[in-house]
Amino acid sequence: MFQYIVKRTLQSVPLLFIITVISFALMTLAPGDPTAMYENPEASDAGSNVQKELIEEKLGLDQPIYVQYYKWLKLFVTDGDLGYSFEDGQPVTKKIVDKIPATLTLMSTAIVLSILIAIPIGVYSAVKQYSKLDYFFTSYAFLGIAIPQFFIAILVILFFSIKLGWFPVSGMREVYEHFDIKDRLHHLALPAITLAFGLIATKSRFMRSSMLEVIKQDYVRTARAKGLSERKVIFKHALRNALIPIITIIALQLPNLFGGALFIEQLFAWPGMGRLSINAIFIRDYQVIMGTTLIAAVLVVIANLIADILYAIIDPRITFGKK
């Protein structure tokens, strides 16, 4: 297993390199000027130009794109340093470390919620195929997949926060501030449910399809023929094999989950990495954008590696790196 993990890690390095190249190119070629935040509106045109040149020289923006990228990459590879924020001069690594626990908390809660809800729904829909509840869950799945997350967030805020007043939509403390489990859960509820809404729909549909395919297999019919209870047949023999596609879906959903977290964190004023990324995009803080993009890509690679390991744990027939 260790050799397989090392091999997959090395294979992911070129992918991460390509991601950084594309991200840096798109970021620097996009319209906008990072020095705009430093401009003095009362300065003359000549003074403004001089000030802009000095700021560009200080930030290294006066150099060609490939030189800027080389310096960023060299600093990261040699020292593990992601540079300094253009906005406040703080280390990008520190800013991400401060924000990433909140994002991981939100994402992990949404994933756990979706798994706990979607798997029973998918199993029930497969076992009770074409029942009224199956049609209901199917309709929900179509709606959950079709409706954008930001629209769900707006509806949730209007109903549960503004109309009923049950949950707040902002005011979540930073991770390093005073910890109150009740207060954290109170603020976590709405964004986590909103983020999980679409995940539940997707997972339940795949779980239903996977379960329908598995329960038609010969070994399931053999288990029934032996006189095993339906509960044992479904949960002991069928469910384990039906979970393999779900693991794949969870790994594939992570990039979309990061994308959804950007808007969810912004709408709910959640102090996470997604909100940090959005703010960095607005002010063209290139160093922060590169840092958050790289960390998000690394987390996706790690999630896919974990998925490969879970394959072998759930199905012993799957082995690492062997055909």
Image: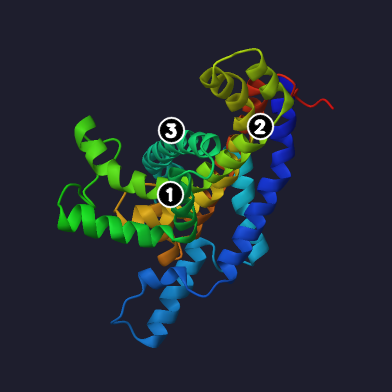
Neighbourhood count class around disc 2 (C-alpha, 10 Å): few under 14, some 14–19, many 20 upward: many
Judged from the image, the secondary structure of the residue bearing numbered disc 1 is: helix
Question: Would you place residue 63 above or below residue 180 in this image?
Answer: below
- Residue at image position (56%, 65%) is 27
Q: State the image coordinates of residue 244 (x, y, percent, origin top left).
A: 63, 32
Foreground residue among 170 and 217: 217
Q: Identify the residue position indicated by label 3 in the image.
A: 116
**Can you give x and y, in whole percent of width and height, for residue 284 in the image?**
46, 65
Residue at which label 2 appears = 214
Percent position (x, y) of residue 203? 52, 42
Q: Determine which residue is flagged by label 1.
A: 136
* Quadrant the N terminus occupies: top right
**Amino acid at dot 2:** Val
Distance of mark 1 from mark 2, alpha carbons?
22 Å
Indicate the amino acid at tag 3.
Leu
What residue sits 63% from the left and 41% below the top? 77
Badge 3: residue crowd in 10 Å (few <14, some 14–19, many ≥20): few
Q: Considering the numbered disc 2 on the image, is that residue within a helix, a strand or a loop?
A: helix
Judge from the rendering whether residue 243 lies leftward or rightward of residue 136; answer left or right: right
Q: Is residue 11 left or right of residue 200?
A: right
| Mark 3 / mark 1, whichever is N-terminal | 3
Q: Position of residue 234 (x, y in %)?
A: 56, 24
User: Is residue 147 in view from this perspective?
Assistant: yes
State how far apart marks 2 and 3 are (Cα): 20 Å
> Which residue is pictured at 36% across the width and 69% down the height?
38
Q: Earlier in the sequence, mark 2 or mark 3?
A: 3
**Residue that appears at 33% across and 57% down:** 153
